[in-house]
Image (cartoon, rainbow, N blue to C red):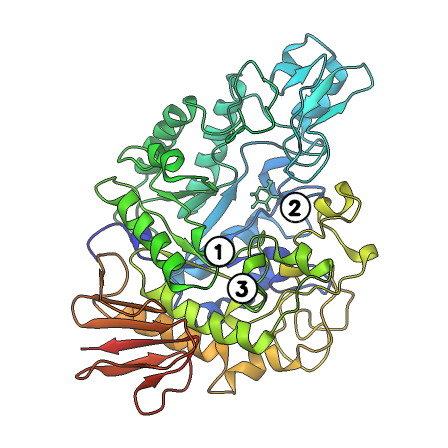
């Protein structure tokens, strides 16, 4: 491997609350993750990214942090984190943590102090308090401002329990420098930066015109100086021993290539997520355009853009690909309104092909827990059990993200499917028809989604053409994706209805579905050796 590890790693996203529950509390925890490390090693992942596990009232499942320097008792202790890092390192797995710098919890001592100190105080300057609100809306629905008892309003781009920091107050960058060093010193190999493009707001806080392409809280120029300073911190960690040089990946849902380009520099953050594969329909031309756009963006930039097919904010891959693709951008709500039906077998077929595409593309790939089992979105969560603040803030009009965050099924035939060692009410209910989707069931089925993932991640690790590098498109029909990577690797996917025939002289390394007489059927992908 020529470049730093993060440029071609396979990273597995662990959503701690739903991964494995060591104390039968109904919520997952760090000891649970630790106990399942052999499963992750067997999946040949190079790193795990942990969603927030800090002290938090969990109003937004941990993205509302009350103490950035500690572990919430529901997830364990700092010692559990250290033990997890040590055990993971023994299996050559790096641990990436989530940094949440845009906002904290309203229970954070700084916000509590600001509320008590009142208007005009320095404590309020660490947040964005004003005498009157502007027209900004919360990403979770409703206004982005909440009024305090003394009449002032504070800004929260998310829930009212998540006040936005004022990044122009010196205490804020100073605290986050300490946060970074605290976790990097404890062995975190990289950081994932939540809402990395919204930390600074236009100081005038102007109203958002109705047709504005970009809100005045995105991509403010000061971000780049901040991230150059973070890069210096990351680079100051020793490169020689495991986990080696420290990485960072920014969560940026960019609207156009022009808005993300400034982040892709040699001295800024090393990586920015590329979510484009999750936004386009299952169609060769659209996928190819997204891949070309990314290759163009990173060329000579010094940055790189990990590929993503799913995460804790997005409708599950199988369900996304199993609906009418015209609805791809809002599948969960479309379904709830009865506008779409999921064809699970079709979604699964496509999801299998999609992961072979993901793992064949140049660069880093992120896998979301449960996608390796082919879990569909869980739509039938009763209103009384929904946790996502989006559901509450929109009066149920938007169902939110709970359906992709359901506790993992490990074994057995009924909930909690081995998620906890004894019967327990899990924090989100699990469907009753997941018996064939458990890790245990899939390990014993040679044709399972899990065994396809395992085969692909192991092959990717061994094949010299895979990971970071270049790719070359082959001439193909409009419903086909076909490219080569050197030395010796070929990729073919059929996104149309008619079979496609594999080129002569190539040997099949892996296929996402049955191949008969070298014909690749609809919604199937193949890895080739030539
Ligand atoms: C995270 C979400 C979270 C939001 C606010 C994100 O984009 O991925 O899960 O709700 O930031 O922190």
**Residue 213, percent from left and from top:** 50, 31
Residue 278: which numbered mark, if any? 1
Query: Ligand 1 appears in which quadrant?
Result: top right
Instruction: Tell me the mark number nearer the camera, choosing from 1 and 2.
Output: 1
Q: Say which element carries label 1.
A: helix
Residue 72: which numbered mark, if any? 2
Residue 216: which numbered mark, if any? none
Q: Tell me, yes or no, if residue 10 can be seen here.
A: no
**Residue 271, percent from left and from top:** 36, 43
Disc 3 versus disc 2: distance between alpha carbons?
30 Å
Is the distance from the Cβ of mark 1 to the nearest ligand 1 atom less than 8 Å? no
Q: Say which element carries label 3.
A: helix
Does residue 88 appear left or right of residue 70 in this picture? Answer: left
Disc 1 versus disc 3: distance between alpha carbons?
8 Å
- Residues at circles 1 and 2 in contact by the CB criterion of under 8 Å: no
Q: Residues within 10 Å of mark 3 (few under 14, many from 20)?
A: many
Which residue in the structure is indicated by mark 3? 317
Q: Is residue 179 above or below residue 407?
A: above
Disc 1 versus disc 2: distance between alpha carbons?
31 Å
N-terminal of the two: label 1 or label 3? 1
Looking at the rendered image, the quarter that the N terminus falls into is: bottom left
Q: Residues within 10 Å of mark 1 (few under 14, many from 20)?
A: many
Looking at the rendered image, the quarter that the C terminus falls into is: bottom left
Quarter of the rendering containing residue 362: bottom left
Q: Tell me, yes or no, if residue 18 can be seen here.
A: yes
N-terminal of the two: label 1 or label 2? 2
Which residue is painted at 25% across and 40% down in the image?
A: 302
């Amino acid at each position: 491997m020529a470049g730093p590890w993060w440029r071609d790693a396979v990273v597995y996203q662990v959503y701690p609350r739903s991964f494995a529950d060591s104390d039968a509390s109904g919520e997952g925890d760090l000891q649970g993750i630790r106990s399942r490390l052999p499963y992750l090693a067997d999946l040949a992942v190079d790193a795990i990214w942990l969603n927030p596990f800090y002290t938090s009232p969990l109003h937004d499942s941990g993205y509302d942090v009350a103490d950035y320097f500690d572990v919430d008792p529901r997830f364990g202790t700092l010692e559990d984190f250290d033990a997890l890092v040590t055990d993971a390192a023994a299996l050559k797995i790096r641990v990436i943590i989530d940094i949440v710098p845009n906002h904290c919890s309203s229970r954070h001592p700084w916000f509590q102090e600001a509320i008590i100190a009142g208007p005009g105080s320095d404590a309020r300057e660490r947040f964005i308090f004003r005498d009157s609100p502007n027209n900004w809306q919360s990403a979770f629905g409703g206004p982005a401002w909440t009024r305090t008892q003394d009449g002032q309003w504070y800004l929260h781009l998310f829930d009212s329990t998540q006040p936005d920091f004022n990044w122009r107050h010196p205490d804020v960058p100073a605290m986050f420098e300490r946060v970074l060093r605290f976790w990097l010193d404890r062995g975190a190999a990289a950081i994932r930066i939540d809402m990395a493009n919204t930390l600074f707001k236009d100081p005038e806080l102007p109203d958002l015109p109705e047709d504005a392409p970009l809100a005045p809280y995105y991509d403010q120029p000061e971000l780049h100086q901040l991230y150059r300073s973070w890069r210096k911190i990351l680079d100051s960690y020793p490169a020689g021993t495991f986990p080696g040089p420290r990485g960072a990946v920014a969560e940026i849902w960019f609207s156009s290539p022009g808005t993300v380009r400034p982040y892709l520099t040699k001295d800024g953050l090393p990586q920015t997520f590329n979510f484009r594969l999750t936004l386009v329909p299952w169609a060769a031309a659209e996928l190819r355009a997204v891949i070309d756009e990314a290759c163009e963006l990173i060329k000579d930039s010094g940055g790189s853009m990990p590929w993503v097919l799913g995460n804790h904010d997005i409708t599950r891959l199988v369900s996304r690909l199993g609906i009418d693709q015209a609805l791809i951008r809002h599948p969960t709500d479309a379904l709830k309104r009865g506008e779409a039906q999921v064809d699970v077998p079709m979604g699964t077929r496509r999801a299998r092909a999609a992961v072979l595409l993901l793992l064949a593309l140049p660069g880093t790939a992120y896998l979301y827990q449960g996608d390796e089992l082919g879990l569909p979105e869980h739509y039938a969560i009763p209103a009384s059990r929904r946790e996502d603040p989006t559901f509450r803030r929109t009066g149920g009009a938007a169902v939110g993200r709970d359906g992709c965050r359901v506790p993992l099924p490990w074994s057995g035939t009924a909930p909690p499917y081995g998620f906890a060692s004894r019967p327990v009410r899990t924090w989100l209910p699990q469907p009753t028809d997941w018996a064939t989707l458990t890790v245990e069931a899939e390990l014993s089925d040679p044709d399972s989604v899990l065994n396809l993932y395992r085969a692909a991640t192991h092959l990717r690790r061994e094949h010299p053409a895979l990971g970071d590098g270049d790719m070359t498109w082959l001439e193909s029909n409009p419903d086909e994706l076909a490219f080569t990577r050197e030395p010796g690797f070929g990729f073919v996917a059929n996104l149309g209805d008619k079979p496609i025939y594999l080129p002569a002289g190539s040997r099949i390394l892996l296929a996402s579905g049955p191949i008969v007489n070298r014909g690749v059927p609809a919604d199937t992908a193949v890895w080739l050796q030539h």
